[in-house]
Image: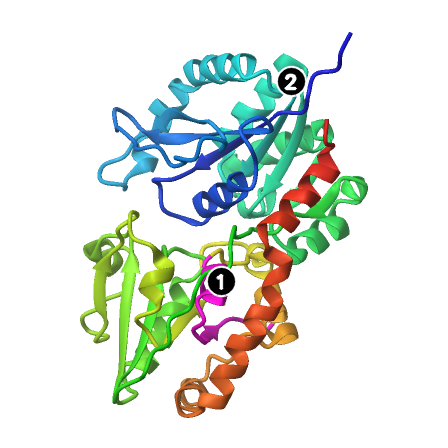
Amino acid sequence: MQKAKKKILLLSWAIPPTIGGSSYVSYELAKGFSKDYLILVGGKKLFKKVEPIFREENKPAVYYLNSEINIKGHGDRFFKLFRYLLLPFLFIKLIYIARKEEITDFLVTFPDEYYLILGHLSAKLLNKKLHLYFHNTYLENRNGLALTFARFYQNVVFEHCSNFFTMSEGMTTFYRRNYPGLQAKVSTLPHTFSAYLPIESKISDQVFKFILFGTFNHSNIESTKRLLMVLSKVENVEVDIYTPINQSVLKYKWNLDVEVLGCNYHLSDPSKDIHLLIQKYDGCILTHGFTGGYSDDEYKTIFPTRTIPMMLSGRPILAHSPPDCFLSEFIEKNNVAMLITTMDLRKIEDSIRQFIRSFELRTQFVNNSRNALSYFYGKNVVEYLKKTIGED
């Protein structure tokens, strides 16, 4: 009897057109595979129509599960119970998709517990291999009843999985140190990019223009507010913010008033190419929280996905990040950004002024970024994944 060819079902809570870190990671990873080796399954809002995200003939098939219930992208927690009532129906649909596509392996991403449950149970029922891809910590970032469930369920999925991939070397080190039973399973599968992109030259005028883009939450909001407050006091500087988060939500939920800080707010358009957008600016802003609503372990291991498009952009990066985390370690080791690890406002301002004043320094950051990108290059990451999971 001929052995079935390897075919992976990549299950991710967020995939395009959803904007966010996990969506970017899953999309860029799937790009590197042919339709015969991988399919992509993710969530979308109920009754929402979506456009094809792959138009090339040989790219992976994409399926959507109607799992997301919210109002204009917000208020998910109010629909949490109803979302779980949908779980049996989505489980049946996922089983159907896996059988139709003759799946041999499930690669299930986390930071969404709901999709972790869906993927784990589907792999178990169909007796297929389960591989986990953690973008964030699980047990360490839970409390209350959620912590009680996570203590039980994390052990279950860790025991069941054949491979345990993490987003960064920082996470891999964390799991190897804290979970000796994972030693033989855990390795790093960095988020990736599919191609090096052309860079446009830009002649700066009297004003130095920064771009800050992406989502804002407990992972970065505290450092973002501090850096923007200091930037607002530096003359001849403009900051444009592009985010899918409504301006009023930024103001009233996250206490980030972009108007008071003198920033220009733009609602993100997922159809716009972020690389082309960055070309209009002199520098990028990258922020990583020092404190907030996440656990200390989460802050130490986060590696923001926006780091990659910034490094690709040909624009220098101004980074505000705590000293004892993997992101700062990566930046310092590769010298890819002006790294500000202090909370002292005067020292932050001094670093900003040095960044703006020194063309030579900014050029060095850009050149170092290009050199460091090979680690994240799509073909390299895909080949590693195939080698680890198995070609066939």
- The answer to whether residue 273 shows anywhere in this view is yes
Relative depth, front residue between 87 and 93: 93
Can you see residue 289? no
Image quadrant holding the N terminus, namely top right
In the figure, 10 relative to 200: above or below? Answer: above
Amino acid on which disc 1 is placed: Thr
Q: Position of residue 388 (x, y in %)?
A: 74, 38
Residue 87: horizontal and vertical position, in percent? 43, 19
39 drawn magenta: no
Q: Quadrant of residue 206?
A: bottom left
**Kind of element beneath mark 2:** helix
Which quarter of the figure has residue 209? bottom left
Q: Residue at x 72, y 47 (%)?
A: 187
Q: Amino acid at mark 2?
A: Lys
Q: Nearer the viewer, residue 303 or 179?
A: 303
Of mark 2 and mark 1, the one earlier in the sequence is 2
Magenta segment includes 318: yes
Residue 195 position within the rendered picture, expressed as x and y whole percent measured from the top left: 51, 54
Residue that carries the numbered disc 2 in the rendered image:
124
User: How far apart are the alpha carbons under marks 2 and 1?
Assistant: 35 Å
**Secondary structure under the numbered disc 1 in the rendered image:** helix
Task: Name the residue that disc number 1 marks.
Answer: 307
Residue at 58 percent across and 35 percent down: it is 150
Dot 2 and dot 1 residues touching (CB under 8 Å): no
Q: Report the span colored magenta.
A: 306-323
Q: Nearer the viewer, residue 140 or 356?
A: 356
Neighbour tally class for label 2: few under 14, some 14-19, many 20 plus, Cα within 10 Å: some
When the figure is inspected, residue 86 is found, relative to residue 171, above or below; the finding is: above
Question: x%, y% of residue 176?
Answer: 76, 50
